Image (cartoon, coloured by chain):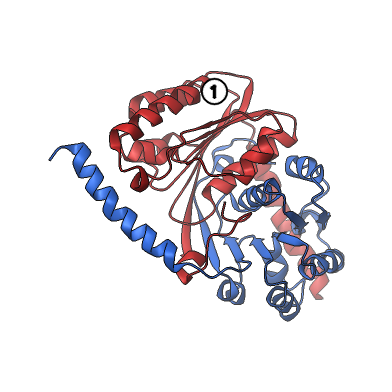
Chain colours: A blue, B red
Amino acid sequence: MDAQEKHKIKSQKMKEKVDARVAQAQIEKGLLLVITGNGKGKSTSGFGTVVRCVGHGYKAAVVQFIKGKWESGERNLLEQYGVPFAVMGTGFTWNTQDRAGDIEAATRVWQQAKAFLADPQYHLVLLDELTYMLGYDYLDKEEVLSALKNRPENQSVIVTGRGAIRELRDMADTVSEIKEEKHAFKAGIKARKGVDW
Amino acid sequence: MDAQEKHKIKSQKMKEKVDARVAQAQIEKGLLLVITGNGKGKSTSGFGTVVRCVGHGYKAAVVQFIKGKWESGERNLLEQYGVPFAVMGTGFTWNTQDRAGDIEAATRVWQQAKAFLADPQYHLVLLDELTYMLGYDYLDKEEVLSALKNRPENQSVIVTGRGAIRELRDMADTVSEIKEEKHAFKAGIKARKGVDW
């Protein structure tokens, strides 16, 4: 038996396995995805999914917690497609150094998030860096979890950020943990426009 | 000292640390990012970075290995922005069951990848699912590594896919390993249009 034949037999077995699993996966509903961990790629993965969604003609909304007033490539492009952005606009907590002000800003942007999470016209809502708002107790955990739980049945939600709390992971349909194996920044390479921001 | 003051002091210390690290990171060059692991979010992270890049007015190119002929939300949208897509178009190897045909298709699409990797007008090149081509020996490892190494100095490249080989991780500036903690598909939930594809 040559390599080509071996490959064919192995592939057939793989195909049977995959087909069986695809046949089993028949529940249709909006998903809650949590992308957490200390590695690079969490927010970009969220934005990549927003592009996928909008590219199919569905509506998506973006809420950015933390995020400051700096320019953002993804926002420049996606706003042209009618994707609404709600941005906390304060920047990193170590720059603001103002806990009360941060909580106020978080609470304000959360009101917009809640409105998206109650609106069935949105096929996908990205809650970028929401995990920190829960980790720092800037937002009420019960209120956030309840808004996620009671969202429209067909709406998917992506939550990104380090250190997702246990309750969020438990509620999620998919959880990815991005581990940093190596990071350019730590080797003295400057954050790059069009790649890192 | 109240919580607000404590927060301020902690934040100041954090800011000093971060500022020192930002000051140290002064090397400017194109990056090689590898996003690997078995979890969800690798390709979407690549596409999110392409959006970021294009949103700043830079040129980006996408090469999709494996990827079949099915419709893709990200392609629908990004082609409107002049992002060229080179797509292998064969689909999963367990579906084609044809090793020789897959190698031929991989080699064909690799020619387009090589052209992008030699063209300084591209600020970013996404090589989606390239890892499998190396893992299956569909492409010559030395040729791929050499094209990556000799690319224009200011060009960034993102390679996605499970099981990135050691040589690729060693060459990369940033490596993220996405671990699957939980996946909706395994709980019987169907892949969702606008989210999973």
Residue A193 in sight: no
Q: Quadrant of residue A107?
A: bottom right
Q: Residue furthest left?
A: A1
Q: A2 above or below A148? A: above
Q: A36 above or below A168? A: above
How many marks the image carries: the answer is: 1
Q: Residue at x 47, y 71 (%)?
A: B187
Residue A8 is situated, as x and y percent measured from the top left of the image, at: 25, 44
Q: A134 above or below B150? A: below
Q: Quadrant of residue A38?
A: bottom right
Residue A20 is situated, as x and y percent measured from the top left of the image, at: 37, 63
Q: Residue at x 22, y 37 (%)?
A: A4
Q: Residue at x 60, y 19 (%)?
A: B120
Residue closer to the observer: A24 or A156? A24
Q: Which residue is mark 1?
A: B116
Label 1 Cα neighbours within 10 Å, binned few <14 / some 14-19 / many ≥20: many
Locate residue B15 relative to residue A46 in the image: left or right.
right
| Disc 1 element | helix
Locate residue B149 relative to residue B46 in the image: left or right.
left
Residue B43 is situated, as x and y percent measured from the top left of the image, at: 54, 46
* Quarter that holds the N terminus of chain A: top left
Q: A138 above or below B56? A: below
Residue closer to the observer: A194 or A51? A51
Residue B119 is situated, as x and y percent measured from the top left of the image, at: 57, 18
Q: Residue at x 33, y 40 (%)?
A: B135
Residue B109 in sight: yes
Residue closer to the observer: A189 or A117? A117
The chain under label 1 reads: B
Question: What amino acid is found at the position of numbered circle 1 in the picture?
Answer: Phe
* Quarter that holds the C terminus of chain A: top right
